[in-house]
Image (tube, rainbow, N blue to C red):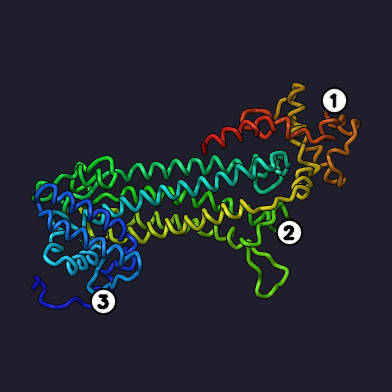
Amino acid sequence: MNRFSEPRDPDFDAINRSLDVDRRLWPYDIAQSRAHVAMLAAQGIISAEDAGKIHDALTLVEGELAADLFKFEQDDEDIHMAIERRVTELAGDAGGRIHTARSRNDQVATDLVLFTRDAARETVAQIERLMSALIDAAEAHIDWPMPGYTHLQRAQPVYLSHHLLAYVWMLDRDRQRFAFVASQCDVLPLGAGALAGVNFDTDRALVAKELDLGSVSPNSLDAVSNRDFVIDYLSAAATSATHLSRLGAELVLWSSQEFAFVELPDRWTSGSSLMPQKKNPDAAELLRSKAPRMVGNLSSFLGVLHGLPLAYNKDMQEDKQYLFDAVDTLTVALAAAAGMIEGAEFNASAMADAAGDGMIAATDLADLLVQRGVPFRESHAIVGGIVREALAAGRPLSSLTLDELQAHSSHLDGDAVALLGQDGWLESKQSEGGTALVRISEQLVSARSLLS
Ligand code: ARG
């Protein structure tokens, strides 16, 4: 018997059922059920004997789920109902007591807190793997010149190590964001009941301790309504995926024959079904395309929560598909980024040739005029004129003679000729955070210490 006079419409089941999405929460559902039942027994709310039977049943169910032998039924709306149904089959009347002083509302929130905490910690570990791959690559190519770009135009030369380390700082901020996410998953919702608290003398601190959570939620309405930790994960994931898309985009460009700065490991590329010569940077391309999907997960779920009255609403069931997609997508993206960087072969001569572009010293020449007392705007214009003339003549700046330079400014002397003839402009960037080797060595030490 129940309050309904007709069976559910199959189409209702189709829209209502969340089992296919939430079944992966089962380890957390078992863990919280164990903690909950132990607390119920400790508080005398159920008997020790019933608690024992439930524990045994939970162990069997856990085994079935782990071995993929668990038989789901049509009426199993979600993983919580499936597990409770099976525990009750196995433990009889005792199983019927597992849901005492608990609602699916505080139950699902608790599973999700535990899931998100684990996911955030794993994401941190994965980010660290990528950071470490980048630091190793930076160390191995510490003094390899390459062009630095703005607007994708050659701007000023930098060392490859400097470029790679730029990503390390980006990723370190991502790592901090995910550590924050994990810190937000430290409060126990269980014990809030459906929304108002429960009619039993529960010991929520005991359950929290059992689940290794730092505190219990102080407000039962907030406990079942809160999905901020999901938003925090989605938001950190959107930012991190956006960072990876920039790395992916550079790997796509750099591995093209036009750049030829890098050769990606074969195991991270694919061939063409038609053109035998091709080696495609698919994983790097996909790093680019995953980012908007992650932003979509965040904005979709913010849309779900927007305007929702307190407390639990079924809308919130949709949280999991966005969260799981974000976790799974970021997991493959971070693994791909680390795999590609770990196996990348950089091409010293292609990068050095591009960095030796005859025009790339123009800013340094302008700075030299500034050191001679010329206002920067004026020196910018003088050097602009020199560049125009050299381009028109098809000559690199380094071929200009003293006379030719002095025709543009009497401040240009032998130092200017020397400056253009050498490649010291990398080593002159000695300002803090600059590309000169002394600074990169310092940077490498601080980057390494991030991971120690
Ligand atoms: N499957 C539901 C969810 O994921 C569990 C909570 C259902 N609660 C309820 N009162 N119908 O949100």
User: What amino acid does circle 2 point to?
Assistant: Gln
| Type of the residue with mark 3 | Asp
Local packing at callout 3 (Cα closer than 10 Å; few below 14, some 14-19, many 20+) is few
Residue labelled with disc 2:
257
Q: Tell which of 389 and 281 is nearer to you.
A: 281
CA–CA distance in space, label 1 to label 3: 85 Å
The vertical placement of 274 against 125, above or below, is below
Q: Position of residue 250 (x, y in %)?
A: 63, 52
- Mark seen at residue 11: 3
Give the CA separation, mark 2 to mark 3.
54 Å
326 on left or right of 244: left
Tally the marks.
3
Give the residue number, with chain letter if any, for mark 1.
410
Cα separation, mark 1 vs mark 2, equals 43 Å
Q: Quick one: label 1 or label 2, which is nearer the N terminus? A: 2
Residue 84 vs residue 375, the one in the foreground: 84
Q: Is mark 1 within 8 Å of ligand 1?
A: no
Q: Quick check: 175 above or below 290?
A: above
